[in-house]
Image (cartoon, rainbow, N blue to C red):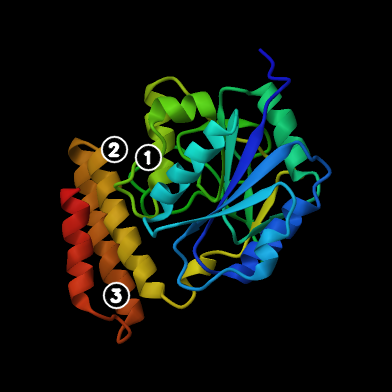
Amino acid sequence: MSTPDALIFVIVPVFGNWDDTLQCLAALESQSATNFQILIADDGSDTPPPAAIHHFSRARYIRYENAGFGANCNRAAREAVAAGATHLLFLNSDTTFGPRFMEQWIRRVREIPGGIMSPLIYWAHNPGQVWSSGGKLTVFTPFCRSRASYGAVTEVDTVTGCAILVPVDGWNALGGFDPRYTTYFEDFDLTLRAKTIGIRTYVVPDPELNVLHHVSGSFRNTVWRKHYLMLESSLIFIRSHYRGVPRTICFVLSAAHLAITAIRSLPKLPRPRLLWRAIARGLSA
């Protein structure tokens, strides 16, 4: 099966962090390929975008009301599908990559048109070290990021949404990201749900596809908000994808992980009420 007329829409979800966003867009602007489109999906940033955000070819800026990462991506995806996209490439705004990045993605979707794919993602400050790769589902998945350095295209259970390419047919069949996940774990959830309906997920190691990640640029000044959101979403994820003894183990590990995080951050832990609210929402969503 080939897809000669594949059209990739790059969706760049944004919440502030404009310096990194402009750098990401500049990398897209310098691509050797030109047959792709870009949607900049602003999730109600609390600061206005710089004028330069409107100066990139093939890019359209859309500002939405704040709804969280997954819901923001879903809204932009609907726009892309309506505009004729065959594949959606979700790309964090704090990433950079080489000039043949899109050229290689276009080639890869012709080779694996129905699969979900993700590249190897490296630390921007240490380009020789993998920040994230895909992996198999284990009881450690909610707590430890997979950092395997794959040497060939490999089928996995989960990949990170930092850079993830999804065929539109599969996206529509899955209904997009589950909106219960405000931020974090919507990517793992998507690929696990995809597996249940026969859509495979692959890590695609390719030097031209390597991504450099500046890591949590949108949370630099609100670190504890990041922890609250991650805790809430991890509990939803555990309840959704684990049963029996593995679920119990995950909840025990979650409590231990929370305790270690709190101890390491004392006395900086603000507003304990938010912590209990995150736990309550994670256990009831």
Image location of residue 23, percent across then percent down: 70, 64
Image location of residue 95, percent across then percent down: 64, 58
3 or 2: tag closer to the N-terminus: 2
The amino acid type, in three-letter code, at marker 3 is: Ala
Disc 2 versus disc 1: distance between alpha carbons?
8 Å
Label 2 CA crowd tier, 10 Å (few <14, some 14–19, many 20+) = some
> Is the Cβ of the residue at disc 2 closer than 8 Å to that at disc 1?
yes
Disc 3 secondary structure class? helix
Please say whether residue 166 is visible from this viewpoint. no
The quadrant the N terminus occupies is: top right
Q: Which residue is mark 2?
A: 241
2 or 1: tag closer to the N-terminus: 1
> Is the Cβ of the residue at disc 1 closer than 8 Å to that at disc 3?
no
Image location of residue 229, percent across then percent down: 33, 61
The answer to which of 261 and 56 lies nearer the viewer is 56
Q: Disc number at residue 262?
A: 3
Residue at image position (80%, 44%) is: 100
1 or 3: tag closer to the N-terminus: 1
Disc 3 versus disc 2: distance between alpha carbons?
26 Å
The answer to which of 140 and 69 lies nearer the viewer is 69
Label 3 CA crowd tier, 10 Å (few <14, some 14–19, many 20+) = some
Disc 1 versus disc 3: distance between alpha carbons?
26 Å
